[in-house]
Amino acid sequence: MPLNRNASFLLLWAGQFVSQIGDRLAALALPWLVYTMTGSALGTGAVFALYTLPYVLFGAFAGVAVDRFDKRRLMIAVDLVRAALVLAVPFVAGRSLPAVYVLSFAISTAAVFFDPARLAILPEIVPTSRLLRANSLLSTGENLTEILGWALAGVLLASVSTSVAFELDAVTFAVSAIALTFMRYRAPARAAAERSAHAFWHEMQEGFSFLRHDRGLRANTVMILVCVAGLGASYPLTFLLAVDVFGGGTAAFGALEAVVGAGYLTGSLAVVAFAPHVRKGRLMIGGLALMGGCLALVAAAGSVWTAAIPFAVFGMANAAALIAVDTYLQQVVPQGMRGRVLGMRFTLTQGMYALSVLVGSALAWMVDVRVLFVVAGAIVVVSALVGLLSREVRES
């Protein structure tokens, strides 16, 4: 069935499109809220890290839950929980900074269950032959929200209170839950005997074992871990570049993120157009190499406008690499293992991301932000070399 006639895919796409616009608003409002309360680069970086820490703690657990339970119902429940949590942020912000950190952690914890479920459900509603294009279309929608959401967030937070951003984000989570409710989906049968015969811990071990023993998947994971080691710091560094170095405030940060989104959109559309004619391995390796080069070039930028060029190309390369990685995982991992393997991947990669965010934010106190961009770019280029050395990744 063509994707434009696949109602389940279209509802998933539409719900995520709306929800992710709200996410951009909240993703800028939360660090800006903490930055205005503390004036600390490290404190602001802690917010970014708290978005990833739950993946380290609960990613493997969430993966087992995704494999055990109805993915659609799980995603609906998570959307409703996140709506309630983001609504609470403005109420606690004026009373307790630690409570803001706790809510940031809780919102991200809920997302730990949503993200692997979204990736795992796609091969169950889309034929294998259309997976690369489906992932490309989801990325296209996501990056339309990057453009619209970040641009709107920068302007909104420059003119009104942060409370509005959190309220709008709550509404978008509700819209996503409604879209998922109307999606036609029948969870794959999994025998009750199987669920009772395997202990929860044993199922987590199965996911890690598959990840460790499949040569291509193992090489792909190492490649992404190296990439994330460099990439993680770029988000708080971009925030500090826009706010401190360029002196542009939230509007400048929103503009840079919107430029990345525009590049990502262009890259996603290119993959949609050329999906039948490209190899995933080339997209992954070439995309990572170009991403690293662009991060290093940011160091030469003297203003938001000159930084926009490498950020735009970075977005294009990021789209190509990420779409190829997601499609590779969906095709390599068997249906009954996807939740566990993806959950374990999230645990490893997001743990590395959180560490990179904190290290990058801490170093920003002592080292010029531009120098840190060069270091981050070099590490991402190394990840491309790791992929190039693996035949399984290179020829996929």
Image (cartoon, grey):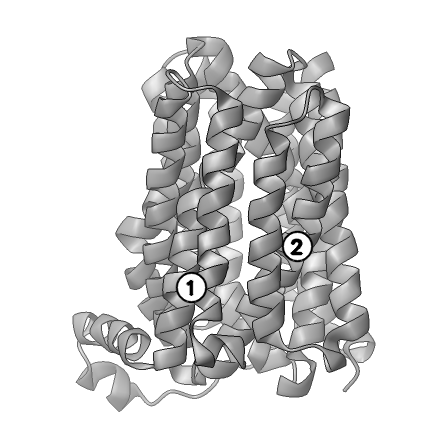
What is the number of callouts on the image? 2
Q: Is residue 169 left or right of residue 102?
A: right
Element type where label 1 sits in the image:
helix
Foreground residue, 222 or 37? Answer: 222
Q: Position of residue 158 (x, y in %)?
A: 70, 15
How far apart marks 2 and 1 lie (CA) works out to: 17 Å
Label 2: which secondary element: helix
Where is 110 relative to 326, above or below?
above
Q: Residue 306's x, y, as percent?
A: 75, 27
User: Residue at the spot x=34%, y=48% of the render?
Assistant: 352
Name the front one of labels 2 and 1: 1
Residue at the spot of label 2: 317
Q: Is residue 106 left or right of residue 301?
A: left
Q: Quadrant of residue 8?
A: bottom right
Spot occupied by residue 54 in the image (x, y as percentages of width and height): 33, 46
Q: Quadrant of residue 189?
A: bottom left
Q: Are marks 2 and 1 in contact (CB under 8 Å)?
A: no
Residue plotted at (75% across, 31% down): 151
Nearer to me, 69 or 277: 277
Residue 390 higher or lower than 172, as above or below: below
Answer with left or right where residue 4 lies relative to residue 158: right
- In the rendered image, which residue does mark 1 sit on? 386
Task: Give, as a three-letter code, the residue at label 2.
Answer: Ala
Inspect this view and state whether residue 160 appears. no
